[in-house]
Amino acid sequence: MTTFLLICIASPAALVVLMYVIDRLISPKKFNPKNAHILITGASSGIGRSLAIEAAKSGAHLTLLARNEARLSETKTMCEKAAKSDKLNILCVLCDITDDYDQIERCVEDSVKKMGNISMLINCAGTSTSGRFDSLEFSYFKSLMDINYMGSVKVTRAALPSIKKVDNGRIVFVSSVAGQVGLFGYTAYSGSKFALRGLAECLQMELNRYNIRITIAHPPDTETPGFEEENKVKPEETRLISEAAKLFQPDEVAKSIFQTAIKGKFLQSIGLDGYFTKIATCGFGPSTSILESAQQVVLLPIVRVVSLCYLYYFRRLVDRIAKESMDKKKQ
Ligand SMILES: NC(=O)C1=CN([C@@H]2O[C@H](COP(=O)(O)OP(=O)(O)OC[C@H]3O[C@@H](n4cnc5c(N)ncnc54)[C@H](OP(=O)(O)O)[C@@H]3O)[C@@H](O)[C@H]2O)C=CC1
Ligand SMILES: CCCCCCCCCCCCCCCC(=O)[C@@H](N)CO
């Protein structure tokens, strides 16, 4: 009886230890940020700015790309203060990622000429708007796609020849929780963020042979200037649904994204909700760790039950607001 109990306890534990050891052996080689050249788009504000500071702390040389010159040089000063050495090179590039491809290619080539090959590209520039589908103008759907999706496509295409030349390169796409889960009010935004996930999955399959690892980041609501802007027009339903998850600070989100990219993991998440959402939406994406895949296999059914509870709660919430506004109209 005791032997049986012992086997019952010891064998799963042994399995986990074995998986952990195999994981360590086969997981992607860590990225060494020290003296690497990292290009960050959207570095003039919010999460992109925090990512730049995080990268500067780790000793990387930086290209900071955005449109606003004053805010970009503010980030540059912050990076210089955060860096441990004064030998870091930081280049600010003024570029609108919705411009023609030739223009963007020139910006990226200029950065490579001055700073050397790009070892890590972080596509963080982006924007968001929410609203009911039938009240959003078509121009929003187009502009979110142009900035969030096409912008990342163009910068990545321009940087790829350079990234292919380094060993163990990285490309990061900043999507959103709204790029994993479709929520009330985000028809235009989610379209552009889900699109990044598709791009990332395809691109990883193409770039494996160059030893380039892709990370797709799915941050939740984060307190940034962009978030403040978004809140000005947010429907009540969207606001209440979003409150089901915690509001994060850009620094903690940036740390998590940067560490995930260093490890070469495909999926990034933050917080317990983020972890559940990551498992619930792992789909057909590449596996970067046996341990992580094992968690998906074991937890998927349980997490689906949790997600159904959330969906039920969100549906009740939307119905309640619809009823309240009907009642108001009647009065
Ligand atoms: N904050 C949040 O709650 C969440 C944000 N995200 C995503 O994270 C990313 C950063 O968001 P956040 O920090 O909140 O946003 P901010 O609005 O604070 O910053 C956006 C950055 O993108 C740059 N940018 C915007 N449009 C362009 C353009 N056409 N060309 C070049 N650069 C551009 C801006 O620079 P400039 O204006 O100088 O050009 C700025 O640096 C976005 O992709 C967003 O969708 C994801 C989940 C949650
Ligand atoms: C098992 C499943 C658990 C599910 C939990 C789901 C919680 C939903 C919270 C939604 C948060 C909305 C994020 C959008 C952030 C964003 O991209 C904008 N703020 C951009 O500015």
Image (cartoon, rainbow, N blue to C red):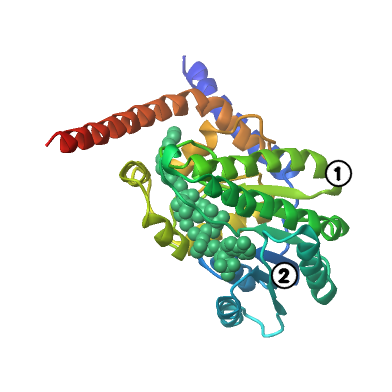
Q: In the displayed structure, would residue 27 be above or below residue 221?
A: above
> What percent of the width, then of the height, locates residue 300?
52, 26
Q: In this view of the protein, which residue sits in the foreground, 143 or 289? A: 143
Q: In this view of the protein, which residue sits in the foreground, 161 or 290? A: 161
> What percent of the width, then of the height, locates residue 112?
82, 69
The residue beneath circle 1 is: 209
Q: In this view of the protein, which residue sits in the foreground, 300 or 134? A: 134
Q: Is mark 2 within 8 Å of ligand 1?
A: no
Q: Residue at x 72, y 79 (%)?
A: 89
Q: Residue furthest top?
A: 1
Q: Which quadrant of the structure image shows residue 314? A: top left
Describe residue 103's horizontal placement relative to residue 132 as left or right: right
Q: Quadrant of the C terminus?
A: top left
Describe residue 314's horizontal placement relative to residue 43 as left or right: left
How many other residues sit within 10 Å of disc 1, few (<14), some (14-19) or many (≥20)?
few
Dot 2 or dot 1: first in sequence order is 2
**How far separated are the C-alphas under marks 2 and 1?**
24 Å
Q: Amino acid at mark 1?
A: Arg
Q: In this view of the protein, which residue sits in the foreground, 57 or 132? A: 132
Q: Residue at x 25, y 36 (%)?
A: 321
Q: Amino acid at mark 2?
A: Lys
Provide the secondary structure element on which disc 1 rests.
helix
Provide the secondary structure element on which disc 2 rests.
loop
> What percent of the width, then of the height, locates residue 149?
64, 49
Number of numbered discs overlaid on the protein picture: 2
Point out the frontmost of discs 2 and 1.
Answer: 1
Q: Residue at x 41, y 24 (%)?
A: 305
The residue beneath circle 2 is: 34
Q: Residue at x 51, y 21 (%)?
A: 8
Q: Which mark is residue 10?
A: none
